[in-house]
């Protein structure tokens, strides 16, 4: 499959993520959109690393494997980030009985 | 030898540090001993250097064999850049060693006198006084010992600073503080000219060492010579109180009396004379400047003498007499008689220190009264002060055989050869000097006592610490002149001229012996007549009749008022104008405008910081998109 398809797909996912972050007020949905953006980038990384591997496998059998490695790292870090982020949202809910991000601007005052 | 020389200025400096830093802890006796002791030690070191001078300056063993010496003793590099090297070096030759002896010797006597005179001061201020006094001596020693103009300038500024500190010693009195400011500012005018002269020399010679500069004189153009010497001379008029910068010296009387003695006799005012005598090679090459020096000197001598005729403050009379005598010295310098000037510096140091300390003794006895109209009849009450003061008056009036006679005579002789008109001015001044000094003496010590009843009971002779320096100085004033007794009196005279000959050339007198006798006789006759007039007029005190001319003299020719209205007031007005116009609307407007602009801009900028997370993210996305667009479409 041409790499273009992957690029279009991940751009679409990324833009959906951005629009979600910008327009929604529910903290959990914003969080999901951020995850979506993260995974759009992951998809792109995997696609490019596969492309490199196919192009350079004759010379170097490990070519492009670093991209795949990165993806694993990102997934691990994302898992940690999700646990922290969800914990914050839980605390937020306990304090305000709402997950509306517009309440977060209280720190301003 | 090198270390011995270094000790001379270092000892007073150590005294300054101890007294200055320990002023809260030291008892008065210790302060006095440290203050005077360091100067005494420095005097002893100066004597030792004086007797071992041959090691430095070279010596004539026989007619054609000579040990070449080097009077310059270098310690370290003071300034060292490619185009200019200024070593921290001392030049100890005949001229500076004579000055060293005068400064430390007379300075020591003044220190001893001060221990008693200032005894009523508080401990802390007593120590402050001695610290300043020691610093003063240190600066003056640095000035005369320096082997280049830069080191000399350091000492030059140092004495200016110390005179400021000491004149304003009683700083709680606003008048005294003003007098101190006046002295400092007047001196700064001269100092600026001195500094310009140094820059001029540096640009021509790339060195300020006396030896280098004097060796390069022949390569100077006529303009260089005239301007360098003229600027140096302006510096000297500030420090040595000549027209037009003399007005600070009479006001310097605000300081304690021993300080006046120190400023007028041993240090400070002789700095200008020393500097010109030291630069005699330069001056001899610039006859035009020499003439200006002689004219200014003669004018100052006469001018100050006329003012002294009508002053009623005992210290003011002496102050104007100092200005007048300094005028004499400049007349001698301008006539090319450098040795006569140095000689007069020496005898003047003796008798002026004596007169000032004597007046201090009188003021001390009269509980602070300085106006001679309220004294009178002190002859029997203060016998030691009276007799020593009389010797001082005889010396300054130029009565044979007191020291002033010989030095004044050699100056007048030089003036006679140089210019007959200046000689007449000098002669007239000699008569006036004798008159006003004896007017002072007669009003103060003769006639009836005119003070209050309280003062009459209080009058007493001063303690030994004050009278001993008086006696020593009186002896020196009486016999000090014999060191340079003219050839006409005795063979093998003029020892000072001979001694100074390697450093300071002195034109041999060309007039015949009979003319010389005649001139001496004329000076003496005029002085004696002046004294007799003073005797007949003032032996019993009468109120002086006010007259137009007398008022003019009493108000010092209104020079202070003239300076005030021509320079001080316009400057003040300019200051007020700048304050109200430039400061308020210009500078303040600019500064406040910048402040307001920042305030306004930040208020606008604050609108961006809404605190809405969504809007921040939107901005982030928009800017990222802009970057991508730029990256894709504007890339070459």
Image (tube, coloured by chain):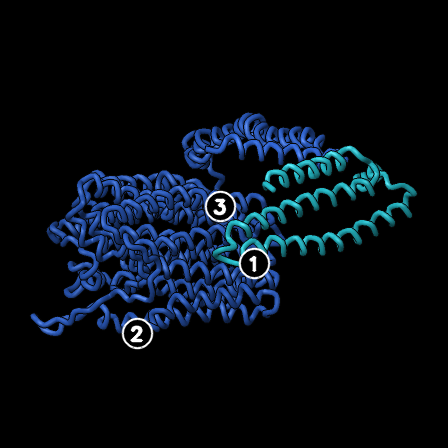
Chain colours: A cyan, B blue
Q: Residue at x 28, y 44 (%)?
A: B200
Considering depth in this image, is B192 or B411 the residue closer to the camera?
B192
Distance in Å between CA atoms under marks 1 and 2: 49 Å
Residue B482, position as x, y percentages in the image = 25, 63
Tag 1 residue: B459
Disc number at residue B1? Answer: 2
| Whether residue B266 is visible | yes
Tag 3 residue: B313
**Chain to which the residue tagged by mark 3 belongs:** B
**Chain to which the residue tagged by mark 1 belongs:** B
Considering depth in this image, is B107 or A80 the residue closer to the camera?
A80
Note whether A29 is above or below B472 in the view shown. above
Q: Which numbered disc, 2 or 3, marks the residue closer to the eye? A: 2
Disc number at residue B241? Answer: none
Q: Secondary structure at mark 2?
A: loop
Task: State left or right for residue B485 relative to residue B271.
Answer: left
Residue B52, position as x, y percentages in the image = 26, 73
């Amino acid at each position: 499959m041409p790499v273009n398809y992957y690029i279009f797909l991940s751009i679409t996912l990324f833009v959906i993520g951005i629009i979600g972050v910008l327009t929604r007020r529910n903290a959990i949905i914003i969080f999901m959109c951020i995850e979506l953006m993260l995974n759009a980038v992951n998809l792109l990384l995997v696609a490019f690393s596969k492309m490199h591997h196919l192009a350079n496998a004759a010379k170097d059998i490990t070519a492009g494997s670093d991209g795949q490695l990165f993806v694993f790292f990102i997934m691990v870090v994302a898992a940690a980030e999700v646990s922290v982020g969800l914990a914050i949202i839980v605390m937020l809910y306990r304090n305000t009985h709402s997950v509306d991000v517009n309440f977060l601007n209280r720190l301003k005052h | 030898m090198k270390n011995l020389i270094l000790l001379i200025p270092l000892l007073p400096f150590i005294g300054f540090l101890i007294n200055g830093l320990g002023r809260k802890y030291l008892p008065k006796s210790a302060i006095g001993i440290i203050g005077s002791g360091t100067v005494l030690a420095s005097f002893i070191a100066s004597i030792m250097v004086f007797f071992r001078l041959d090691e430095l300056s070279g010596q004539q063993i026989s007619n054609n064999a000579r040990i070449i010496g080097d009077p310059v003793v270098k310690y370290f590099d003071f300034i060292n850049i490619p185009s200019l090297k200024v070593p921290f070096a001392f030049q100890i030759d005949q001229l500076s060693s004579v000055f060293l002896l005068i400064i430390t010797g007379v300075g020591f006597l003044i220190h001893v006198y001060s221990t008693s005179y200032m005894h009523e001061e508080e401990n802390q201020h007593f120590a402050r006084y001695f610290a300043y006094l020691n610093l003063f001596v240190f600066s003056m020693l640095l000035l005369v010992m320096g082997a280049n103009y830069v080191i000399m300038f350091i000492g030059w500024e140092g004495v200016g600073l110390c005179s400021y500190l000491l004149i304003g010693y009683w700083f709680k009195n606003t008048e005294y503080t003003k007098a101190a400011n006046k002295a400092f500012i007047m001196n700064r005018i001269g100092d600026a000219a001195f500094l310009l002269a140094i820059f001029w020399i540096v640009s021509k010679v790339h060195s300020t060492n006396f030896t280098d500069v004097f060796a390069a004189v022949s390569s100077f153009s006529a303009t260089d010579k005239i301007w360098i010497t003229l600027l140096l001379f302006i510096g000297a008029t500030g420090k040595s109180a000549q027209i037009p910068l003399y007005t600070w010296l009479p006001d310097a009387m605000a300081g304690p009396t021993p300080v006046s003695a120190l400023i007028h006799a041993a240090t400070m005012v002789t700095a200008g004379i020393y500097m010109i005598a030291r630069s005699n090679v330069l001056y001899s090459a610039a006859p035009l400047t020499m003439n200006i020096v002689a004219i200014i000197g003669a004018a100052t001598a006469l001018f100050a003498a006329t003012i002294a005729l009508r002053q009623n403050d005992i210290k003011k009379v002496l102050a104007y007499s100092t200005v007048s005598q300094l005028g004499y010295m400049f007349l001698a310098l301008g006539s090319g008689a450098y040795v006569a000037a140095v000689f007069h510096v020496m005898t003047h140091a003796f008798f002026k220190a004596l007169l000032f300390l004597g007046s201090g003794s009188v003021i001390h006895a009269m509980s602070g009264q300085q106006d001679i109209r309220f004294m009178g009849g002190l002859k029997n009450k203060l016998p030691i002060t009276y007799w020593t003061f009389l010797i001082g008056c005889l010396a300054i009036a130029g009565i044979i055989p007191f020291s002033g006679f010989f030095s004044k005579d050699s100056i007048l002789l030089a003036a006679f050869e140089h210019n007959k008109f200046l000689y007449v001015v000098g002669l007239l001044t000699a008569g006036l000097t004798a008159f006003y000094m004896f007017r002072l003496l007669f009003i103060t010590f003769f006639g009836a006592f005119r003070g209050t009843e309280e003062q009459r009971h209080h009058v007493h002779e001063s303690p030994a610490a004050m009278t001993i320096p008086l006696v020593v100085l009186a002896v020196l004033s009486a016999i000090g002149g014999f060191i340079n007794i003219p050839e006409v009196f005795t063979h093998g005279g003029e020892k000072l001229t001979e001694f100074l000959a390697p450093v300071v050339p002195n034109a041999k007198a060309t007039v015949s012996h009979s003319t010389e006798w005649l001139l001496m006789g004329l000076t003496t006759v005029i002085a004696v007549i002046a004294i007799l007039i003073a005797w007949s007029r003032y032996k019993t005190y009468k109120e002086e009749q006010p007259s137009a001319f007398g008022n003019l003299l009493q108000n010092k020719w209104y020079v202070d008022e003239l300076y005030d209205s021509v320079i001080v007031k316009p400057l003040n007005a300019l200051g007020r104008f700048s304050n109200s116009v430039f400061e308020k609307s210009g500078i303040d407007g600019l500064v406040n405008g910048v402040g307001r602009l920042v305030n306004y801009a930040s208020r606008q900028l604050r609108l961006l910081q809404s605190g809405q997370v969504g809007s921040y993210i939107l901005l982030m996305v928009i800017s990222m998109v802009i970057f991508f667009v730029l990256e894709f479409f504007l890339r070459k």
